Amino acid sequence: MRLDAVARRDVRLELRVERRKLAHAPPDAAERAQNRAIAFVEGRVTLRAEPLDALGAREDLTEGNELRVLAGIVQRGSIELAQPPAPAPLAADEVATIGRMFRDGGIPATTRIAVMTLVADRGLREVLPALAGAEAESPAVLDALLAAKTKLGAPPTRGDLRPYLEEKDPAVRAVAVRALARLDDPQALIDVGRAATADADVKVRAAAVDALGKSGKSAAVPTLRQTFAAPEPEVRQASARALVALGGPAADQALVDLALNGESRDVQTYAAIVLISERGRDSEPVRRLAQSNPSPAVRRVLDHGLEIMDKHGE
C-alpha cells in the first residue's frame, strides 16, 4: 500500500514543522548513531516501497535530521508505510550493520527494540548471529531480544534463562518467566508455575500467571486454580484472565470447582462471576454449576448476575 496524496501532504507539512524545531540543533553522537540505525531500517526494510524522496520533503530538511523526523512521525502513527510481502534475505554487510546497531549503546533502546521486533516479525533468520551479540541492558530490551530469538526459531534454553530467574530485579525475573512459558518444554512450564506461586514479588507472580494463560497449555490449569485464590487482587485477576484465555473443558471445570469449593466465599463468587461474564448464563459450565448445589452466595450470583457484577470490587 502506497501513501496517498493526502498522506503525503500531511507528512510534508509535519516534516516542515519539525524541521523548524530541529534545524538549529546539530545532532550529538547519540543522535547520529540513532540516525544511522533508522537510516538502515527505513532504507532497507520499512521504506522500500516508498522512498523518502517520494514524499517531496528532502529539500526542506537539514542533512542528518530527515530520517530522525520521519521515524518520529511513523512512531506516532501519523502514517502507515508499506511492508513488502516477502523481503529478500539480508546481505552479510547488512547483517553486520544490524549487529553493530544492537551493540551500540548510543542507539536508544526503543530503536533497538523496534528493529528486533521488525526482523523477527519478518522472519529474517539470517539476523540470529547479530541477536547473539546484542546488548540487553534493560528488562525491555531483554524481553524483545528473547522474544525475537524465539520467533526466529532459536529460543533460549532453560539453562540460558536460569541466571535471569535468579536476578534481584523483579522486572528481569518477569521477563524470564515469559520467555520460559514460550518454550515447548514441560519442565519449563513447571518452572513458570513455581514462579507463579512462590516468587517473592507480586508482579513476577502476576507475570508468570499471565504467561501461563498465553502458553495455550491445559497443563497450566492446576497452577491457575491455585493462584486464583491468591490474596493479591492483581494475581487473582491475572488468574481469571489466564483461565479464560486457555478456555476448554479443563479451564471451565476449574472455574466450576472454584465456584463450588473455593477457599473462601469471595473466591467462590468471583469464579461464578467470571463464568457468567465470560461464558454466558446459558452456557454448559454455568448450567452445571447451577445444578451442583452451590452456596447461597454463589446462588445469588447465578440468580442476580448482572447486579452482583456491578457491585463486585473486581
Image: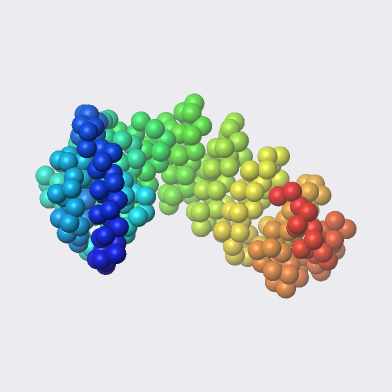
Q: Determine the image quadrant of residue 7.
A: bottom left
Q: Is residue 310 placed above or below 173 in the rendered structure?
A: below
Judging from the image, the colouring scheme is: rainbow
Closer to the camera in the image, 106 or 228: 106
Q: Is residue 218 visible?
A: yes
Numbered-mark total: 0
Residue 229 percent coordinates (x, y): 71, 45
Percent position of residue 32, x then y:
20, 34
Residue farthest to the right, as pictured = 296
Q: Residue at x 71, y 64 (%)?
A: 276
Q: Is residue 252 left or right of residue 261?
A: left
Q: Nearer the viewer, residue 106 or 171?
A: 106
| The one of 252 and 21 positioned closer to us in this rendering | 21
The quadrant holding residue 232 is: top right
Residue 128 visible here: no
Q: Quadrant of the N terminus?
A: bottom left
Q: Return the x and y of residue 144 as percentages of the image width and height.
A: 37, 43
Looking at the image, is 252 positioned above or below residue 163? Answer: below
Q: Is residue 244 left or right of residue 158?
A: right
- The residue located at (85%, 56%) in the rendering is 297
